[in-house]
Image (tube, grey):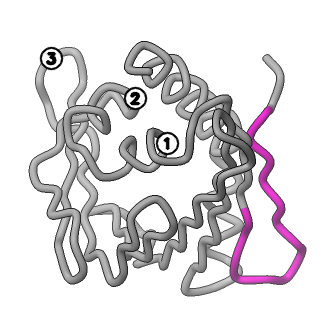
């Protein structure tokens, strides 16, 4: 599968930059990050809380086929500018990974295309490198592909 989502991780840095262009209008792309029903569809997770506003909190939960909680994550939205920017924290519960800071910037390329720039900052180089040892690149690429497929149905 082509890796349309690009992950740039420079050696020795505590951050990474993720970029992806979508065949979607920027307003629709932004909705995929702030509307719980859309988030659940493309992330394949349950949204327990999503307060899409400045200082709003969020929490998601993913279960295995037997209904056991496999992963729970949460955070706080520090800035939300419709169709332009989201700054939030992300913490996966019950894991050695600490809190990360995520900056999402949404850019209109044309009336029907857009670009997402994500800047993710970790607590340490070691923490970031541990995330990159997992199938992170493939997972985010697959998630973005699902996001685009689901949003095309809403166009």
Furthest residue to the front?
111
- Mark closer to the chain start, 1 or 2: 1
Distance between the alpha carbons at the discs numbered 1 and 3: 32 Å
Where is residue 1 drawn, in percent x and y?
A: 79, 17
- Residue drawn 60% across the image and 40% down it: 140
Distance between the alpha carbons at the discs numbered 3 and 2: 21 Å
- Residue drawn 59% across the image and 66% down it: 105
What residue is shown with label 1?
Answer: 29
Q: Please provide the residue range marked out in magenta.
A: 4-17
Task: Judge whether 123 appears above or below 6 on screen.
Answer: below
Tell me the quarter of the picture where residue 59 sits: bottom left
Where is residue 104 drawn, in percent x and y?
A: 54, 66
Name the residue nearer the viewer: 118 or 54.
Answer: 54
Task: Please tell me whether mark 1 sits on a helix, a strand or a loop.
Answer: helix
The circle on residue 92 is none
Distance between the alpha carbons at the discs numbered 1 and 2: 12 Å
Dots 1 and 2: beta carbons under 8 Å?
no
- Residue drawn 17% across the image and 57% down it: 50
What residue is shown with label 3?
Answer: 66
Task: Judge whether 61 appears above or below 87 on screen.
Answer: above
Where is residue 42 drawn, in percent x and y?
A: 40, 29
What residue is shown with label 2?
Answer: 42
- Mark closer to the chain start, 3 or 2: 2
Tell me the quarter of the picture where residue 81 sits: bottom left
- Residue drawn 59% across the image and 35% down it: 139
Dots 1 and 3: beta carbons under 8 Å?
no
Image side of residue 68 versus residue 32, left or right? left
Task: Judge whether 138 appears above or below 16 on screen.
Answer: above
Q: Does residue 6 belong to the magenta stretch?
A: yes
Q: Which of labels 1 and 3 is toward the front?
A: 1
- Mark closer to the chain start, 1 or 3: 1
The residue carrying pointer 1 sits among few (fewer than 14), some (14 to 19) or many (20 or more) residues within 10 Å by Cα, namely many
């Amino acid at each position: 599968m082509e890796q349309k989502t690009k992950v740039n991780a420079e050696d020795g840095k505590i951050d990474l930059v993720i970029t992806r262009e979508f065949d979607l209008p920027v307003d629709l792309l932004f909705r995929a990050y702030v509307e719980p029903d859309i988030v659940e569809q493309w992330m394949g997770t349950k949204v327990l809380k999503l307060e899409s506003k400045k200082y709003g909190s969020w929490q998601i939960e993913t279960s295995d086929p037997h209904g056991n909680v496999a992963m729970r994550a949460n955070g706080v939205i520090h800035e939300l500018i419709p169709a332009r920017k989201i700054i939030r924290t992300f913490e996966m519960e019950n894991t050695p990974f600490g809190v990360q800071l995520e900056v999402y910037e949404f850019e209109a390329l044309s009336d029907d295309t857009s670009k997402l720039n994500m800047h993710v900052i970790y607590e340490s180089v070691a923490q970031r490198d541990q995330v990159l040892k997992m199938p992170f690149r493939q997972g985010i690429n697959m998630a973005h592909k699902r996001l685009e497929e689901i949003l095309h149905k809403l166009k």
